Amino acid sequence: MNKYSTDNISRIGNAAVYIATHAKNVSKTKLLKLLYLMEERSALRYHQPFLGLSYEVWQAGPVAKDVYIDISDGGVMLAPYIKIVNDDDAQYVVAAKPFDEDDFSANEIRLMDEVLAEYGEKTAKELVAITHRKGSLWYNIAKEKGLLDAFKSHKSNNSNYVIDFAKGMAPCSADYYDEALALHNASNAYSL
């Protein structure tokens, strides 16, 4: 698991709180897909990382491995922010505390609102299909690396291939994004 600064954990946790309080029936998979769609939108539209999470190409779509492991293990990093509750044979992510808007700019909150307005009512299964769509960054890597058949036949359920958002951008935009991501990562490393 990567190390995250207190500020970065707070941003990840508060993004999860925002999703849990503004979307319908948030499962672990749905939370992961909505976080991804926020990251993708920020990267491709504004050429800026949103949370700066790394997303791997897994069978169920792009997955922020550290968030997945944390939630699956009962939550250590995100325990102050969200919890998993059982309801009618299903598990849902719920907020463990109120959203703290101080972690986000007005533009970032607007971005979260846009993504949730577009995708917040969708099921986890629908979100997986959206992130798998032909031509998506997930699809392109899965195809290039020969993972589509392995995923479809359930011979594999994950990979170590990381989605590079810069591949969906023009070269000058990709350079700008890569610099912004490097600055984000350096800031996170120095804040540990």
Image: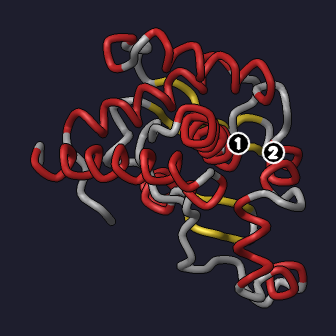
User: Quarter of the image holding residue 138?
Assistant: bottom right
Residue pointed to by mark 1: 30
Q: Residue at x 68, y 49 (%)?
A: 29
Q: As shown in the figure, which amino acid type bears the numbered disc 1?
A: Lys
Q: Is residue 74 visible?
A: no
Between 107 and 120, the one lying in front of the other is 107
Position in image of residue 157 (x %, y %):
70, 78
Q: Assess disc 2: are there few (<14), some (14-19) or many (≥20) residues with their C-alpha within 10 Å of its C-alpha.
A: many
Position in image of residue 108 (x %, y %):
49, 20
Residues at discs 2 and 1 in contact (Cβ within 8 Å): yes
Residue 33 is left or right of residue 18, and the answer is right
Between 80 and 23, the one lying in front of the other is 23
What SS does tag 2 mark?
helix
Q: Residue at x 70, y 42 (%)?
A: 30
User: Quarter of the image holding residue 163?
Assistant: bottom right
Residue pointed to by mark 2: 127
Q: Earlier in the sequence, mark 2 or mark 1?
A: 1
In this picture, is 81 found above or below 134? above
Q: As shown in the figure, which amino acid type bears the numbered disc 2?
A: Leu
Between 12 and 176, the one lying in front of the other is 176
Q: Residue at x 36, y 31 (%)?
A: 11
Residue 20 is left or right of residue 134, and the answer is left
Between 32 and 185, the one lying in front of the other is 185
**Tag of residue 87:** none
In this picture, is 161 found above or below 50? below
